[in-house]
Image (cartoon, coloured by chain):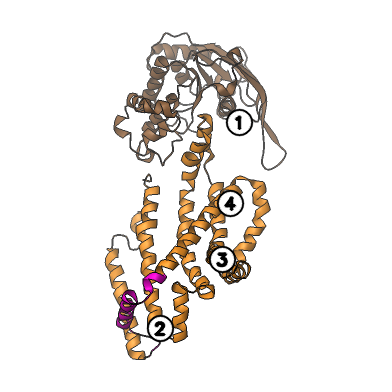
Amino acid sequence: MNAAELDIRIDRKAYVASSGASTRVAIKDLKLSVSDSEFLCIVGPSGCGKTTLLNIIAGIDDDANGTIVAKNDQPLDSIRISYMFQTPRLLPWMTVRENVRVVMDDATVENGKAEQLLGRMELSDSLDEFPNRLSGGMQRRVALARAFATEPQLLLLDEPFVSLDMPVGNLLRQLLLDLWQTRPTTVIFVTHDLREAIYLSDRIVFLSRGPSRVILDKPVDLPRPREVEDPQIDQFRQNLLSEHESVLHGVTSGPSVGKNTNDKTSSEPDLNEKH
Amino acid sequence: MNLVESIPGAGINTAWLRVISFILLLVIWGASAFFAQSRVLPDPWTVAIVFYDHLTNGSLLFDLGITLWRVAAAFILAMVSGTVIGILMGLRKRLDFLLDGWLILFLNIPALVTIILCYVWFGLTEVAAIIAVSLNKFPNVVVTLREGTRAVDHDLLQVAQVFRVGPRRLFFNFFLPQLYPYIMIAARSGIALIWKIVLVVELLGRSNGIGFQLYVFFGDFDIASILAYTLAFVIVMIAVELALIGPMDRYATRWRK
């Protein structure tokens, strides 16, 4: 079966504060489409509703006004979705192997697919370990293997490498690209790190501050495979930032618009910033 | 300061202390019996002989078996029904509001009242006895499991939802394991409570079991036999903890660091 192709339109998503009647609109008039086997990155400032958007697409959050239409009107709940969360969310009472198997069909478990994927993640020696005994990077690798274990048509990732240090994060980014290239799937990857987005994606969509909507849709036309340290990535980033000065802060302004310059526009969110 | 080092007793060989403590208890008991020289306070040696006598010639093993069976039946009944109701109340707010008042009522009914009413309504039968015992434990299990259900990590349930695992896997692999600590708490305190209440139930309405025999010995003023039966009872209790509950707990939590 093909990878997913989606037209996403979210008219409004609001949170009602538990204390009273005040509501906070997280997403408003957001339109987004993603094509077959595309690697799409969504970049936006912290707290702009990126996670909310992924949760709506994943079907975890069904309290939003909007529509998500798949290619050929394929019903959304028949699309195989995987989701890699900000934290690994492994089941601590299950071994590494069981954590991958638990999301798989019984038929595919028999084929040794879990072991094969974990082998590619270089976790063959840790199959029967419990997640608590693994490092953060290893736990992320288990989560990545789990995400690919169901042969997803749509893979959602929510800043999955955010709390890792640079070398570990880069290894995981590379593993993700390897898997994506051998098992094509449509990817929506949320991040606030522009360099990460350029390294990974075919296209970057920038969101505004909440209530979030799309403020810039930018194809990344760099050839693959890319190197993390490739100067082209920095070049691309600088060009983009000089063209759209404060896009990382969720504000639409070209260099000619001066009203936001007192904003701390130059301080791009750090690669390892934590929430 | 290191927290572990500051825990009192850390680093001392605690097994020895336990042995010394046990011997000390026997010495105090023996000394008291020696100075009292009374029929109502037999010394440890007399109790040991009476214990052996009941074990080989009397009905100690039979009574112990009967009581053990009642404990097991009441325990399972209370745990299963309490777990089911507790989970449902934890999940469904409306049901929680509906039953919460009853729960508080049940928690505050004295054990003796439950026992008397069960015997009056269901007759002096085995079923009435077991229901009476489990009813005393049941509300406590409900409260514990309701707390556990409320504390369930929804992040993990979302994983199950996104990956569309079936309802069986959702329950047994994602949900229930999160309740293990609460089930263990309910089980531990449950055994302790049921052991005690089952004797009262036997005393009031059964013609066998440890509770009934204690009642008979009480009538005869046979304190040595009472202590011997108590000893047997306590040994079985400790054995259940060591051989059953402990290993179960260790297995269920083996994934912890």
Work out whether residue B132 or residue B20 is closer to the camera in this orientation and state it: B132
- Coordinates of residue B212 in the picture (x, y in percent): 47, 75
Chain letter belonging to callout 1:
A
Element type where label 4 sits in the image: helix
Mark 3 vs mark 1, CA separation in Å: 49 Å
Residue A127 visible in rendering: yes
Mark 4 vs mark 1, CA separation in Å: 28 Å
Looking at the image, is mark 3 or mark 4 earlier in the sequence? Answer: 4
Element type where label 3 sits in the image: helix
- Coordinates of residue A110 in the picture (x, y in percent): 37, 28
Amino acid under disc 2: Ile
In the image: residue A59, left or right of residue B22: right
Marker disc for residue B85: 4
Circle 3 or circle 1, nearest the eye:
3
Element type where label 2 sits in the image: helix
Residue A144 visible in rendering: no
- Coordinates of residue B64 in the picture (x, y in percent): 40, 69
Circle 2 or circle 3, nearest the eye:
3
Which residue is labeled 3 in the image? B128
Circle 2 or circle 1, nearest the eye:
2
- Count of marks overlaid on the render: 4
Circle 3 or circle 4, nearest the eye:
3
Marker disc for residue A61: 1
In contact (CB < 8 Å): disc 3 and disc 4: no
The chain coloured brown carries which letter?
A
